Every structure is written in C-alpha cells, then in structure tokens.
Amino acid sequence: MTNATTADVRLTQLCTFWLDGLFFGVDVAQVQEVLRYQEMTTVPRAPRAVRGLINLRGQIVTAVDLRCRLGLPDRSPEQWPMNVIVRGRGEVQSLLVDDIGDVIDTTDYPLEPAPANLPESVREALLGVMSLPDAILLVLDSDRAVDCATTPESVGGTP
Amino acid sequence: MNDDAEIVSEFLVESHENLDQLDRDLVELEQHPGSRELLSSVFRTIHTIKGTSGFLAFNRLEELTHAGENLLSRLRDGELELTEALTGVLLEMVDAVRALLALIEQSGSDAGHGVDIDPVVARLRTALEDPGEPPLVEERAPASVSKPTADGFETASPVPHEASSTNGADASARLLDLPLEPSRLTPERRGTSVRVDIDLLDSLVQQVGELVLTRNQILQKSDGVEDVELLRAAQRLDLVASELQESVMKTRMQPIGQVWAKMPRIVRDLAHQLGREVDLQMDGHETELDRSLLEALKGPLTHLVRNAMDHGIERPDERVAQGKPAKGVLSLRAFHESGQVVIEISDDGAGIDPARIGDVAVQRGLVSRDQLSRMDAREVIALIFQPGFSTASEVTNVSGRGVGMDVVRTNIERIGGTVDMSSQSGRGTTCRVRIPLTLAIIPALVVEEGGDRYAIPQANLVELVRLEGEELRRSVEVLAGAPVLRLRGHLLPLVSLAEVLGEDRADTEALTVVVVASDDLRFGLCVAQVHDTQEIVVKPIGRQLKGMATYAGATIMGDGRVSLILDVGGIAQTAAVESVVQQAVDTRRASGDETALLVLEVSGGRRAALPLHEVARLEEFSDDIVERTGSVEVVQYRDGILPLVRLAEAIGLPAPERTEDASLSVVVHEDDGRMVGIVIDRVLDVVETELALSEVGRRQGVLGSAVVQDRVTDLVDLDAVVRLAGAAV
C-alpha cells in the first residue's frame, strides 16, 4: 500500500468526490470501497465530526463527516452522504462526502502546495493540490482527515 | 524421520510435562515433608525418565537420574528425612535433567559440553552417603548446570530457570509455539500436536465472531415462525455455533495456571536466596486469557513477584519484631472483571512509604518539590513507574521498590494493559495488572436510552431494580443535588445514563435502575428500558473514540445495528460517583424548599420531628448521672448543667415506661448559648421533605402535624419546650 503521508509519494490514481462544491481526491490505494448511505449509530458526546458507527460486514467503522471535519457548512438534511471507506494506520474508517466522482489518472499533474489563503481547517488536511485542466483537485491526506481530536468544536468562520 | 526419532520426540514431550509436575511436587513436598504420595509421584517420574533414557542410550541422563532415583528411594522408604538442603539438591537435579533434555532436543544426543552434570551427581551421592551433613547447596549450586538461580535476576526479564527451560520451547506449550524463537525442532517431532499460525487462529476467531452474529440474526428472525423445519435448523445452528465458538476461543485462550505453575519454584528459589519465609497463595488458575498475552505477561509478572519478595516482604526477624508472623504472605489472584483480566499481586510486607518515594523522585529530578506537594499518595507511588526511577542500585536501597518497574509498565502497556499500585505503609502492597480482552465474546445486558441500545457487561451487573410511584418517592432522595437510592438500608448513588450521554433526564413515574459495580464502587445506572442479556462480540472502536471513558467498545446486535458497550468504571469516573458516596454519608442538608427533619420516637411508638438545624448534638446519658434540682432533672455536661426535658410529657403524651436498660437518649438543643437536653426514646431517621404542616394535633409544645415517611408526625415547637425547661429552672 502506498504511504500517502510522505510528500514525495507518486500519486497516480485518485478517487475523487465532491464536498460543498469543492473537488477532492484521495489516493486510490487507501480506498477500500465506496458505499451509498449506511445506517449508523450515533455516539453521544463524541467529537462533532464523528457522525456514528457503521456495521461494515461485521467490522465497526467510524464515520467521519468531512464537511464538519474541514469546517465546511453542514449538508442539508435531505441530502444523504456517501461513504468513502479508507484504510490507514491499521484501522478502517469512513469519510462521509456529498457525491462520488470518477477515479482519475493524475500521473501528468504535479502535486503543488495548497494555496496559503485556503482556510486553515481545510489546508491542514491536504497533501496538496493538483491543477487539472477543468478543475482544481484538493488532494486529501486521509490519515489526517479522520483525526478528529484536533477538530475545533465550532464550525469556524465559513459562512 | 525414522522410528527412533519419533520415540525420542515422544520421550521429550512427556518428560517436559513430567518435569513441570516435578517442580511443583518438590516445592509442595517441602511444605509437607511427610507425604508418601508426593514422594512416590516424584520417584515414579524420575524412574520413568531413567528407564527410557537407558533404553534410548542417553547415558549421562541415565547416570544423573539414577543417582537421583537412589536418593529418592531412600526418602520414599523413610530411611532419610527430606530437608531443605535435600530438596535443593533434588531441584538442581531437575534443572540438570531439563538442561540435558534441551541438549537432546537440539543435537539428538546427550553427549555435549554445554551441560556439566558431574557436580550434581556428586552432590546427590554425597547426600546419599552422608545425609547428616547436607551438601553446601547455596555456595556450589551456580557452578553446575546452566546457572538456574544465581543470575538473570538483575536483568529486565528475571525469569530464574527460564534459561534452561525455554531452549526446548517448553513442551507443554507445544500447540501454539510462538514464532518468537525459532525452535530447532521440526514439526514432525512434536508428535500429536500441530503448530498453527497465530494469524490463522486470529482469523478463525474473527470468522466465528461473524458466525455468532449471523446466528443471532437468524434466531431473531426465526422467532415466532411457524416453519418447524426452519426452527429445527435454527436450533441446530445455534448449538453448533456455540460449540464452535467455544472451541475456537479455547484454542487461543489458555489458563493463567500455566504461569502460576512456575511460581512456586520461583518463589522458593527467591525465598532461599533472599532469606525470606513466604507462603505463596494462588487463586484463579482457571482464569483464561489469550495465549500471546499470557506469553507477554510472564516476564512482568515474575518481576513483580520478585519485587514483592525482595522489597515488600521483610526478613523473618524484622517481621517478628513488628508483630507480624515470620512467614510473609504473597498472594497472586487472577480474575475477569469488566471484560478485562485482572491480576493482583499482593504482599503483607513493608509497603511503600510515599514520603521516601517522593524524596527520591525529587532527588532524581523527576518532579519538583512543588509538583510533589500537589500529588496524592497514589500519584506519588505511581512515580516508581517513571523510567528514571529505576536505573541506579542505590535507589533500590533507599526507596524499597522500583527495579525496572518502568520496564514492567512498558511491557504491560504494550499489550494494551495497565498497571497500578496501592500500598499501606507497614501493611503491604498490592499491584494490579489489567489486561483488556479485545477478542472476547462476553455476556451483556442490553439497555435502551434515547432510542439507542447499549450493552453493559454482565461482569459489572449486580441487580435490576424497578421503582414506581409511591415507592419511587420514598426510596429516592436528592442529597445536595445528587440522587441516591435507599436500597435495603444502604445508600446507592444514582447516575442517569441519559445525563452521562449528554441528554436531558426525562421525569418519569417509574425508574429502572441497573445496579452495577466496578472495583469497589457500586452505583445505580438509571436507564429508560432494559432488554435482555445476550452474548456480544466486543469489537474495538476507532481511535477518535478511544479517549472516551464512557465506552469500552462496540458490538453488533442481532438486527445488524451497532451498539456501544458501556464502560462502568469509566462512567463512574465521568459522573464523579465517588464524591457522591462521600456526600451521602456526611451531608444531609436541605435544598430548596425542603427541610431536613430529625424524626424521633417518643412515648413508645409515637413519632415527632425536629428541624435538623436546631439539633446541636445527640447524646446518650446513663440514668444514674441524672440529678435533680427542684423539680427539674439535670445532668452535668461540658462543665455546666444541662436541664433535661422529657419530650413525651412536654408535648402532652403519656410518659413511656421506664426501661431498665438505664440510659437516656438526648437531643441537645443550643440557643443563645443556653442548652437544653430533650429526652426522647430514640432517633428514627433523618428525612428531607417538603413540610405541609397541618393544624391537626396542634397543642402545647406541638406546632402541628405533618405526614413524614407516610406517618403522621408531630412537629415539635422547640421554643415552647425550651420555655418549659427555662420556666422550670
């Protein structure tokens, strides 16, 4: 499995998804599968970004709402999130996202540092960005994205 | 592999098992020197080894065991008395036999230079010829076999005779020989057992876990179904799954008795070496835990035992001087608690003096004086687990404990456990090691709160209590904001699960209380609903939630939904139950509109009440110190004179019959420095209640009546009663 936490890693294939109109990608090697909305059990008093626990074929998976984690506004209640199941640091976790895109080949595009004016809450969870012809792809560090201990309690300054 | 090799292999496995038994027998024999039975068993074992080794032409082994057998036969026939020194020689022989067996396992022959048996054989013969002068075991022992006792102690893995026994990868552990140390034995030589990869077992356990969950689902679905065929199949599935689960768990689980079995020998050797007398008590042999955990525990446990003997239990003369029995008690206990295995090692020795630990810690720069002053005794004792505490030998002399304790802690934490220590100076020390069972399947009670189900491990469960209506009002009280339940004469702190989970507590007409216990702490957990008990598979939860004390893990219910497993100990911590217990004992102060009343019995069964804040003290006076001045009864009290008023008479009730037990219960009331003693029959209770005073019963000395604890109770007009006493004086 590719270790995506180091910057010099070669990201050739990214699984993409949308979140509040932003285009995100995560290394395909870390993605186990993508699932439609799953029923989950809420965990009282857990960090806000932890939306609940999912039964994934007998394995218990923590679902982290990426919108909340990245300080983006909450999803409208009638919009069901999708699950991007990622593996990392010996655990399986689910990232709740708005919509799933394609797996794209990014061999030709260099990973650039995230623009400094991105909100800190988004920037700190990124490996960098890729400037694709028709979009800017935010490349997510999935290990850091599922860490919720550091998440600020409030949603932050985003409108 | 030819026939010979197979025979050798069988011989090795069998002998290793026998030797473990031999160790135990010999140590036990020392306690009961007269036991024919034990002696015969020891003799038989050695005899068997001798016979087979002769047959297989292991000449040196034969020579050694032959010498041992001679000595044993004289002992068995009662011609010789078993002394400590003789036991020492025999144990040496066992070690030498082990060393030879290890040699055979490696090289296929007992001829080699690694093991020198001659000194042992010589001592065995000396002992035989001249039992009056026992051989000097202590001085000469280390010279012989692979140094079983003398060294290996000051290192981090102080397992005394491990050096000789691990070589052959302990025959009794043959099934799950861990890949820690590649054994030189080929699998074929292991006889009837098979070596299984730990990973394979892990996945088996996991799959069986899945099967159990699926079975639960099927059972739930088939409940109430008419189809007899389906029902029968479901029943069979239930049975088979349960049995399969049990067996698969068994393959990984092993009783702690395996570790315990080595302890008598270790303790005996250490006691000899350190000049201690120790009575080793072991409990919970059957407590099972995962094989790999067991393996990882051996080192730390041995270390703790050694520490307890070296620094805990004093020398016999010191103990006698302190009025303790010369023989110290070292007790090892293992048991399951809250889905964890708890191992307790306690001694009745000198204990740990926090002050000295503190001094050393400051000296060594681990904490500042200032930090130290803010720590409680427990935290100070925990300092011995600090890495810097252990290295230098002088620390051992000063502080009493701490050689390599940081290593012990590191090793235990590596397998997800915790270790803590409590000690009473002069009384002893208890060390608690807790190891979680992440793979366990445990019975649990399923409860519901806020529409979600939660599991409470059966191990924490004490009882279920349901209170309704009148009973609820009567037995639940709020003390300084903390609800408590009167349960059979005890006060039980109540914790609302809803509040623990951050929701509002719903006011209901009924209360369901799950009485739980963790460690020494008991409390009642109020839940919305209780479902049934079921077997659940404890699954780990993600790292985002690991820090939450409230949850021990999660599990999957019959319908496939995830439920959280509650951590009772963690809830007690979060809800600060401990302080509630304290308050329940000490303070009974009124809050809000409620008044605390002291309820009394007067005049043989009639009830009266006083506001609690008017009561200064409760006293008991002997009848014969009551004196009279004029018509008033008085007693001398606190350098003054305390006038007494008989409450029954003061409130117009018939005087109770004077009893012969000749003592008076007196409520002392103090007002502007004047004291009055109010004589009553006895104090019934203290209750907090909203006073609804009724005019009924109003008369001299009585303000009126109220219903207190469902009984009509006179509320005493204290002013009037005091005036009565004053007028009389």
Image: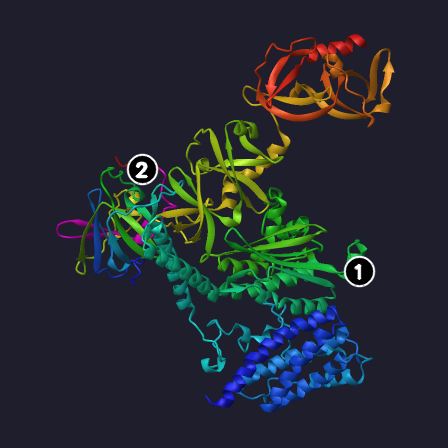
Q: Is residue B57 above or below residue B23?
A: below
| Coordinates of residue B235 in the picture (x, y in percent) | 39, 57
Residue B141 seen in render: no
Q: Amino acid at mark 2?
A: Gly
Badge 1 density bin: few <14, some 14–19, many ≥20, Cα 10 Å: some
Q: Amino acid at mark 1?
A: Asp
- The residue singled out by tag 1 in the image is B317
The chain letter for the residue carrying disc 1 is B
Residue B495 magenta: no
Along the horizontal axis of the image, is B194 left or right of B325? left
Q: Which corner quadrant of the image does residue B667 belong to?
A: top right
Q: Secondary structure at mark 2?
A: loop
> Range of the magenta residues?
A129-153
| Front residue of this view, candidates B213 and B24 | B213
Q: Is residue B451 above or below residue B70?
A: above
Q: If the image is split into quadrants, where does the N terminus of chain B sit? A: bottom left
C-alpha distance separating marks 1 and 2: 70 Å
Q: Which corner quadrant of the image does residue B237 belong to?
A: bottom left
Residue A144 magenta: yes
Q: Residue at x 66, y 81 (%)?
A: B46
- The residue singled out by tag 2 in the image is A156
The chain letter for the residue carrying disc 2 is A
| Front residue of this view, candidates B79 and B20 | B79
